[in-house]
Amino acid sequence: MLGSGKGSNFVAIADAVAAGKIPAEIAVVLSDVESAGILAHARDRKIPAQFIPPGKFRTKLDEEAERVFVNALQTAKVDLIVLAGFMRVLKGDFLRAFEGRIVNIHPSLLPSFPGLEAWKQALEHGVKVTGCTVHFVDAGVDCGPIIGQQTVPVLDTDTPENLHQRIHAAEHELYPKCVAAIARREISVVGRRVIQKK
Ligand code: GRF
């Protein structure tokens, strides 16, 4: 799992793994932020956790960092990469090394509101329903094939903060379910469509 932030989605998935709901093992947690909560949560659970300096760019990994990330993931022999609040766009060699094996969660109903602060974008646009999306990662930003979505109503009284909070709660339900379906090999991808076999 890769993350840059507090790691609440990591906790939801790690708890689901520990409860036997996901037939998988979290092999390693990597972060581009040394102080990220996700690393501390992983260490609390005795899961290998490593900070890797991201290099000179702000929104992507530089070539050397990309190489170190790919190497760490290959050494850990991972089958699937789960992005949980990883704030850098993955590019070229990284995507090629793990094609079709990277998933992400985004805090809106894609394709609406890709990019940053999607809950705020939804509120400002005035939609009545938003939510979260788990999707495969491809070369675009927030636009690979959609694995699962969960809706969250937008209330008249909502502030960006409390809408974000309810989306986060929905993420913690949706993400473990999607990862479990992948781990059970129930998922196949046909063009842009992700079909669940069971
Ligand atoms: C989530 O809102 C997710 O949708 C976005 O980053 C956030 C990560 O939160 N991609 P956390 O670090 O899992 O708490």
Image: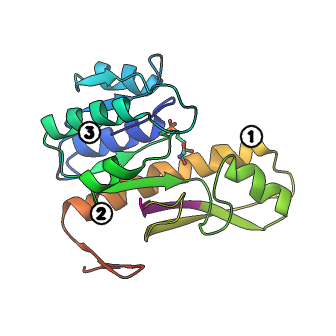
As drawn, the label of residue 116 is none
Q: Which residues are magenta?
A: 132-138
Residue type for callout 2: Gly
Local SS, label 1: helix
Is residue 76 visible in the rendered image? The answer is: no
- Nearest the camera: 150 or 87? 87
Give the distance between the C-alpha atoms of the residues marked 3 and 1, in whole angstroms: 35 Å
Residue type for callout 1: Glu
Label 2 sits on residue: 100
Label 3 sits on residue: 70
Q: Mark 1 and ligand 1: say if the CB distance to the nearest ligand atom is below 8 Å.
A: no
**47 magenta-colored:** no
In front: mark 3 or mark 1?
A: 3
Above or below residue 39? Residue 170 is: below
In front: mark 2 or mark 3?
A: 3
Residue type for callout 3: Val
Badge 3: few (under 14), some or many (20 or more) residues near its Cα, within 10 Å?
some
Which residue extends farthest top? 35
